[in-house]
């Protein structure tokens, strides 16, 4: 069965004063293209990067990312 | 585009153009050494354009942008694996051509072998950058 990692990054960005992808990328130390790829499900981030993103939004990793089977 | 993407594009066109120029130079010098000045005239603008492209590729999207993040590293690793496979294939093909051309007991001038290796190297570099561009292209368009 194929598992898919979905995320709420786009919604969370807009809930946080419409944070731009570049601003989020700068906060977690990656390029904007990586944030775009993660948002669109084209790239699965490392655990460290996932936790950094969750911390930026003051959420847990499970609140940002969800594994769908 | 981030720095790695820009570097991949510059590297791709640089190595591809170098391969073409290299092949052209080799053929022209085989025909006549008098073409050396013409080759210099072609090479100088090419180097100037390549330098300008390298300067452009060093520009960052923002001051906080890292030189290379985890996705860039992953893409680079995959491109290295593909280009290594390509390198093995190109060495095999070039050696096979030399053996078929000269025969089993034949020989080639010592100056030809470095020329072949340089050509294989340029094509491997082209393959590496092309693989990087393809892997970056698998992500969708920016929208935010």
Image (tube, rainbow, N blue to C red):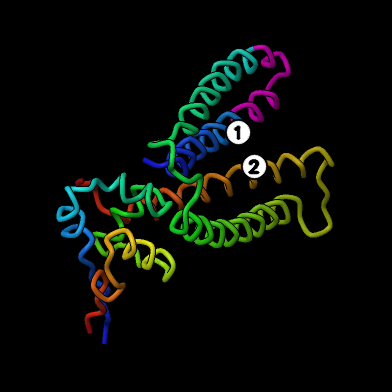
Residue B33 within the segment the image draws in magenta: yes
Residues B103 and B51: in front is B51
N-term-proximal mark, 2 vs 1: 1
Residue A7 within the segment the image draws in magenta: no
Within 10 Å of disc 1 (Cα), the crowding (few <14, some 14-19, many 20+) is some
Provide the residue designation for mark 1: B23
Residue that protrudes farthest toward the bottom in the picture: A1
Q: Is residue B121 above or below residue B58?
A: below
Quadrant (top left/top right/bottom left/bottom right) for the N terminus of chain B: top left
- The percent position of residue B123, horizontal first and vertical second, equals 57, 45
The span picked out in magenta is B23-37
- The percent position of residue B66, horizontal first and vertical second, equals 48, 46
Within 10 Å of disc 2 (Cα), the crowding (few <14, some 14-19, many 20+) is some
Task: Identify the residue at image location x=19%, y=59%.
Answer: A12
Are callouts 2 and 1 both on one chain?
A: yes
- Contact between labelled residues 1 and 2, with CB atoms less than 8 Å apart: yes
Q: Secondary structure at mark 1?
A: helix
Which of discs 2 and 1 lies nearer the camera? The answer is 2
Cα distance, mark 2 to mark 1? 8 Å
Q: Is residue B89 above or below residue B23?
A: below
Task: Identify the residue at image location x=64%, y=47%.
Answer: B120
Q: What is the chain letter for disc 1? A: B
Provide the residue designation for mark 2: B119
């Amino acid at each position: 069965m194929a598992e898919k990692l979905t995320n709420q990054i786009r919604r969370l960005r807009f809930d946080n004063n419409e944070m731009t992808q570049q601003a989020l990328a700068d906060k977690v130390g990656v390029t904007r293209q990586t944030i775009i790829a993660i948002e669109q499900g084209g790239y699965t981030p490392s655990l460290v990067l996932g936790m950094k993103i969750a911390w930026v939004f003051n959420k847990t990793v499970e609140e940002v990312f969800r594994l769908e089977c | 585009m981030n720095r790695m993407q820009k570097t991949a594009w510059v590297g791709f066109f640089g190595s591809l153009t170098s391969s073409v120029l290299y092949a052209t130079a080799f053929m022209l010098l085989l025909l006549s050494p008098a073409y050396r000045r013409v080759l210099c005239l072609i090479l100088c603008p090419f180097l100037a354009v390549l330098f300008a492209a390298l300067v452009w590729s060093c520009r960052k999207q923002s001051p906080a942008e890292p030189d290379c993040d985890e996705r860039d590293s992953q893409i680079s690793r995959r491109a290295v694996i593909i280009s290594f496979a390509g390198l093995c294939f190109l060495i095999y093909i070039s050696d096979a051509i030399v053996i078929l051309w000269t025969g089993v007991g034949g020989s080639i001038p010592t100056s030809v072998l470095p020329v072949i290796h340089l050509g294989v190297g340029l094509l491997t570099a082209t393959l590496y950058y092309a693989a990087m561009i393809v892997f970056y292209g698998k992500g969708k368009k920016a929208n935010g």
